[in-house]
Amino acid sequence: MPRSVIVHENFLRRVPARDFPAGKAPVPGLGPVQAVEVFRAQLESRALDLTARAMQKAGQGFYTIGSSGHEGMAAVAAALRPEDMAFLHYRDAAFQLMRARQVPGQSPVWDMLLSFASSSEDPISGGRHKVLGSKALNIPPQTSTIASHLPKAVGAAYSLGLARRRPPEHRALAEDAIVMCSFGDASANHSTAQGAFNTAGWTAWQHVPLPLLFVCEDNGIGISTKTPDGWIEASFRARPGLRYFKADGLDIYETFAVAKEAADWVRARRKPAVLHLRMVRLYGHAGADLPTTYLPKAEVEAEEANDPLLHSVRLLSEAGAMDPEAALAAYLETRERVDRVAAEAVTRPRLKDAAGVMASLIPPARACRPTNGPEPAARAAAFGADLGQMAEPQIMSRLINWALTDLMLEHGEIVLMGEDVGRKGGVYGVTQRLQARFGADRVIDTLLDEQSILGLGIGLAHNGFLPMPEIQFLAYLHNAEDQLRGEAATLPFFSNGQYTNPMVVRIAGLGYQKGFGGHFHNDNSVAVLRDIPGLILACPSDGAEAVRMLRECVRLAREEQRVAVFLEPIALYPMRDLLAEKDGGWMRAYPAPGERASLGSVAVHGEGRDLAIVTFGNGVYLSRQAQADLAALGIAARVVDLRWLAPLPEAAMLEAVAGCGAVLVVDECRRSGGPSEAIVAALALAGVRRVARLAAEDSFIATGPAYAATMPSRAQIVAAARAALGR
């Protein structure tokens, strides 16, 4: 017999017999009417779990990880305000059901059953995933079970204090709100979670406001792996900067009282805290999981005997809020009602094609206040003597600095964050003087944790800011790439465009650094970024291009709510010369305000028709050198700078190479997984006959004299061009 049926029959047998698990008497705080509301939310959560299993068995439901044993989270919801943003653990249906009772006009059972049925009418994900979440209830949907939502909860909590000082145009959270983030005891061990706890404590230690309530739902096991006894309490009690609270999550009265105390403490002191709740897990991990295959039957039965619904019936009876007969009747009525609603939900339409599934990959545009750029007086104050130098050619790093200054003057919601971006001005000086110009709360020196840097950005975006996180080196992104893949880029997809993470992530990367490096500071792999649906990847080749493209990335984030990654070629930051020493051929004047390089456009250098060299980043610099060498050999070439690596500007690229005798694709990234694979495919599918490719070797990059040995060179481009033309 399924464990779910056993737990159900135990409830039907034990309530009439008054056979309740032992526990304390109800503590004050939860009034009788509110206690009954909490219990009814618990009943709905349990009924939904049982109905989901029946739906799956009938082929009408598709994922049955449930909340049974964690119904005490309804009491946590009762202790919070609907204005408090909640990032929920996947076992928190009871929380959402209780919060729905605090907000008029909600139909949470219907909504959740539509999600279980993968109906396109599901109000949170549009049928894309069985996921908790509701825009009306201030619950962004979560897509992960490994606590990847914790870093952005830290960021959202930080945004509350920043928004008090600098309210953004699209502010979403109330001034006195707090942020709640829940997770399981097993997930607490994940590096992502540990980074979030550390960042929260590190921030609070410096007396920076961070009104965040972590809730650890401790059922003692993760799938089949036990959590050591006492581990959660010992690890959280010892954490500096975090206040620790503890309650029995099986007792709704105690849970409410302690959760209220913890929430009030966080709200009043604007500091983070941890609420540690004891839970049980019923039925195993998920629908297909059989706990008796890895746990002794006696242990499983002991957990089932501690059913939180049985605890609630006893407590309600002792408090005089509801007698056991009424509780049993409510249980049966709820089961019948949920089954009846499910019978209708499974008839509702589902997604049918790729277009429907992908409709929410790109978030909707939003209306923004018009702007005419920064005020002249503000520019004069910020730039000082630099204003007089803007007409003179400059190196890329300086032009990016000026672009950031102008953008931050124009858009007060832009916030920069990263390692060393403030006081030091960045590893390469790109963000010099920005903290002095805009303050430490808009140019934030973070701790050294890429997951927390990106999480801070994602959380700030939840409250209307336009974050610009910096990842110091491309290789460092791999420590945190799931924050983009699993959180930022997926949020519009799984919320049907209701929640977005508009941001511009700046990353210094690619190869060709002579004096610094090896593979950790020279990384020429962008495959992980190109393969995230909906993400924009920009890669400029010179300072003017960088300015125009950065402006476009900010526009895309601000107005179209896109996630953009701006990949800055480190080796080109200081580049001055092109063909000869001191020729200044790679320096550029600062583009006039308003000039942008639109998404999907390319830049073309030269009009040669013998050959088109399609490339990006450092490849543009090397190809422009090769272009001169080829001209000396009588070969007229044009260089096509792609600018955008995701999505590839295929239409503009094809137009740019039209009429050329051959096309050479120059890719400084690795042969396997580099952009050239897609570029060559696009050219071939479009009927371009003579296509050649020069790409980097499938290798890491060395330090020392061989720093560029595995990547394309000027001479190799010339040789490849001649070979492509048969010369």
Image: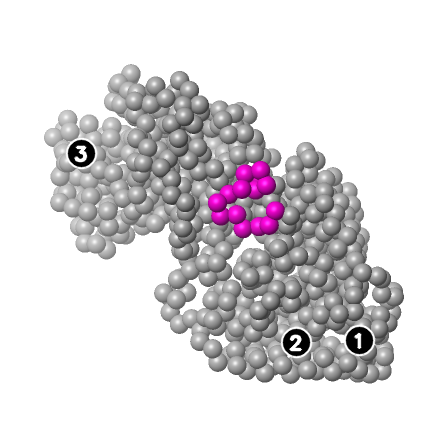
Does 505 sit above or below residue 632?
Answer: below
Mark 1: amino acid: Met
Residue at mark 3: 606
* Labels 3, 1: front one: 1
Mark 3: amino acid: Gly
Q: Earlier in the sequence, mark 3 or mark 1?
A: 1
Asked if residue 516 can be seen in this view, the reply is no
Whole-percent x, y for residue 92 in the image: 65, 63
Q: Which mark is residue 375?
A: none
Q: Quadrant of the N terminus?
A: bottom right
User: Which structural element holds mark 2?
Assistant: helix
User: Which structural element holds mark 3?
Assistant: loop
Q: Quadrant of the C terminus?
A: top left
Residue beneath the point at 79% across and 69% down: 32
Residue at mark 2: 47
Q: Earlier in the sequence, mark 1 or mark 2?
A: 2
Q: Earlier in the sequence, mark 3 or mark 2?
A: 2
Mark 2: amino acid: Ala
In depth, the one of 300 and 90 nearer the eye is 90
Magenta span has 168? Answer: yes
Asked if residue 262 can be seen in this view, the reply is yes
Marks 3/1: CA–CA distance? 83 Å
3 and 2 marks in contact (CB < 8 Å): no
Residue at mark 1: 322
* Labels 3, 2: front one: 2
Q: Quadrant of residue 133?
A: bottom right
| Neighbour tally class for label 1: few under 14, some 14-19, many 20 plus, Cα within 10 Å | many
User: Which structural element holds mark 1?
Assistant: loop
Q: Quadrant of residue 64?
A: bottom right
Tell me the magenta residue range: 162-175
Relative to 189, is 497 on the left or the right? left
Relative to 17, is 723 on the left or the right? left
